[in-house]
Image (tube, rainbow, N blue to C red):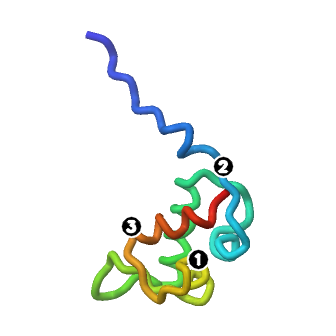
Amino acid sequence: MPAKKGRKPSAAFMKPLTPDAMLAEVVGSKALPRTQVTKKLWEYIKKHKLQDNKNRRMINADESLKAVFGGKRQVNMFEMTKLVAKHLK
């Protein structure tokens, strides 16, 4: 029986992307893979206690995140990743 190969992460996912000025305020200006951008975003959200207390899937935006979220005060986790993608090159 052949050994099961580990799943390789997609090359596109691991390609370093540069955050624009708005997103750089939250995750830093260094080019990072999407996975790291998301990780840093969650660190920021937890550090500033921006996760909604009643509905944990919702993220409440502070001033820095509001710019990233296109002016929205609150977004859900899935919408967040979509909005953040617009700020990566």
Secondary structure under badge 3?
helix
Name the residue located 32 percent from the left edge and 79 percent from the top edge.
Answer: 56
Residue 85, percent across and down?
Answer: 55, 62
Give the crowd class for mark 2: few <14, some 14-19, many >=20 residues within 10 Å: some
Give the crowd class for mark 3: few <14, some 14-19, many >=20 residues within 10 Å: few
Give the mark nearest the N terminus, 3 or 1.
1
Instruction: Determine which of the numbered discs, if any, sits on residue 38 in the image.
Output: none
In the figure, is residue 43 to the left or right of 60? right
Residue 82, percent across and down?
Answer: 47, 65
Residue 2, percent across and down?
Answer: 31, 12
Q: Amino acid under label 2? A: Pro
Residue under numbered circle 2: 16
Give the mark nearest the N terminus, 2 or 1.
2
Is 49 in front, or is 32?
Answer: 32
Residue under numbered circle 3: 78
In the figure, is residue 71 to the left or right of 51? right
The span from disc 3 to disc 1 (Cα, nearest Å) is: 14 Å
